[in-house]
Image: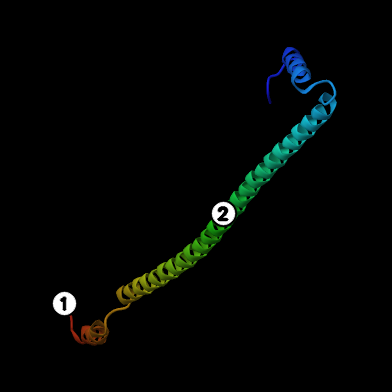
Amino acid sequence: MFDIGFAELLVIGVLGLLVIGPERLPGTVRTVALWIGRLRRSFSDIRSEIEREVGADEIRRQLHNESVLASLKESKDQLNKEMSKAGEGLRDIENSIGQKQDTATDEKLESKNTPDTEEQSLAPAANEQAPNKQDPTS
């Protein structure tokens, strides 16, 4: 804490001996030592309390960060669920459109493969007329 060497302590001791006197010096040294001990303890208590407060602040920050991360994860999960629901809905729409297109294509193919009703009604009449016609060469 303080940078006091042996020479400074010797000077302080000699001055104390001269000012206080040899009879009261031992009691004064004990009293000063007690006060220094109390100051050191109070400084160490204050330092440990500050460290605990700083540690508590760090713990609060960590808890806050964890709660923020938890809420972000919850939001992410909810968003993923909504996205999967939207994707399923989109796939259902694509499937229904594909089925309608397949049905329309099948209907077009069937209409091309089967003659129209007019053609069907004309075809027997044409077949009936053909035998009635006589070939001029015969």
Asked if residue 1 lies left or right of residue 100, the reply is right
Q: Which mark is residue 137?
A: 1
- The amino acid type, in three-letter code, at marker 2 is Leu
Asked if residue 131 lies left or right of residue 79, the reply is left
Q: Nearer the viewer, mark 2 or mark 1?
A: 2
- The amino acid type, in three-letter code, at marker 1 is Thr
Using the image as rendered, state which of residue 49 and residue 86 is in the foreground: 49
Report which residue position mark 2 lands on: 69
Q: Which mark is residue 47?
A: none
The residue sitting at 49% across, 67% down in the picture is 85
Identify the secondary structure beneath mark 2: helix
Q: Is 127 rendered above or below residue 28?
A: below
- Label 1: few (<14), some or many (≥20) within 10 Å? few
Identify the secondary structure beneath mark 1: loop
Using the image as rendered, state which of residue 114 and residue 23 is in the foreground: 23
Name of the residue lying farthest toward the top: 7
Residue 90, image x and y in percent?
42, 66
Using the image as rendered, state which of residue 20 and residue 135 is in the foreground: 20
Name of the residue lying farthest toward the left: 136
Using the image as rendered, state which of residue 11 and residue 4 is in the foreground: 11
- Label 2: few (<14), some or many (≥20) within 10 Å? few
The residue sitting at 58% across, 54% down in the picture is 64
